[in-house]
Image (cartoon, helix red, strand yellow):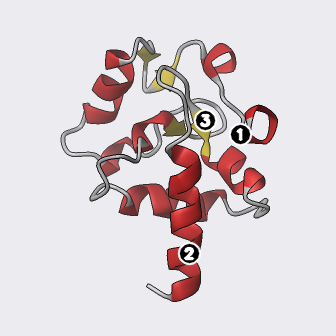
């Protein structure tokens, strides 16, 4: 990993730590907030690399349609879903049911 990515990943983690309990955001929303529109995939890589940090709620970051596209990066096939459900977020067919209602946009809310 290079220092530029390390710095970007740390900034992603800082934003992810601010996602409220029971809410979700998207990879693109975090990228946009950080001034890196178009870097949603890089945010996804950061979320995948965040698992050693217990304080980064990577399970609250989903794709722009509310799909749990990162679920295969969690231990066990259902862990991401289970973590969301433990916060009262309903998930059906690997998608957040009330995505628009639960969506947290850091560009608006921070």
Report crowding for label 1: few under 14, some 14 to 19, many 20 or more residues within 10 A (C-alpha).
Answer: some
In the image, farthest residue toward the left: 76
Q: Are marks 3 and 1 in contact (CB under 8 Å)?
A: yes
Which label was assigned to residue 34? none
Picture coordinates of residue 105, whole percent (x, y) = 72, 34
Q: Residue at x 31, y 17 (%)?
A: 86
Closer to the chain start, of discs 3 and 1, is 3
> Which quadrant is home to the N terminus?
bottom left
Q: Residue at x 53, y 38 (%)?
A: 62
Report crowding for label 2: few under 14, some 14 to 19, many 20 or more residues within 10 A (C-alpha).
Answer: few
Closer to the chain start, of discs 2 and 3, is 2
Indicate whether 7 appears above or below 105: below
Closer to the chain start, of discs 1 and 2, is 2
Front position in the image: 105 or 44: 105
Which quadrant would residue 102 be assigned to in this image? top right
Task: Please state if 100 lies on the left or on the right of 25 as rendered.
Answer: right
Indicate whether 58 appears above or below 53: above
Disc 2, SS = helix
Report crowding for label 3: few under 14, some 14 to 19, many 20 or more residues within 10 A (C-alpha).
Answer: many
Picture coordinates of residue 70, whole percent (x, y) = 43, 46
Badge 3 is on which residue?
25
Q: Residue at x 64, y 32 (%)?
A: 65
Q: Mark 3 against mark 1, which lies toward the viewer?
A: 1
Indicate whether 21 appears above or below 1: above
Front position in the image: 91 or 83: 83
Badge 2 is on which residue?
7
Picture coordinates of residue 13, whole percent (x, y) = 50, 55
């Amino acid at each position: 990993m290079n220092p530029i990515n390390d710095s970007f990943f740390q900034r992603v983690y800082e934003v992810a730590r601010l996602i409220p309990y029971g809410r979700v955001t998207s990879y693109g929303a975090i990228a946009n907030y950080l001034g890196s529109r178009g870097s949603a995939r890089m945010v996804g890589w950061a979320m995948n690399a965040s698992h050693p940090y217990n304080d980064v709620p990577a399970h609250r970051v989903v794709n722009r349609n509310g799909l749990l596209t990162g679920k295969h990066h969690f231990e066990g096939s259902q862990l991401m879903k289970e973590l969301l459900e433990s916060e009262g977020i309903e998930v059906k067919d690997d998608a957040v049911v009330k995505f628009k209602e639960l969506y947290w946009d850091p560009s608006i809310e921070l």
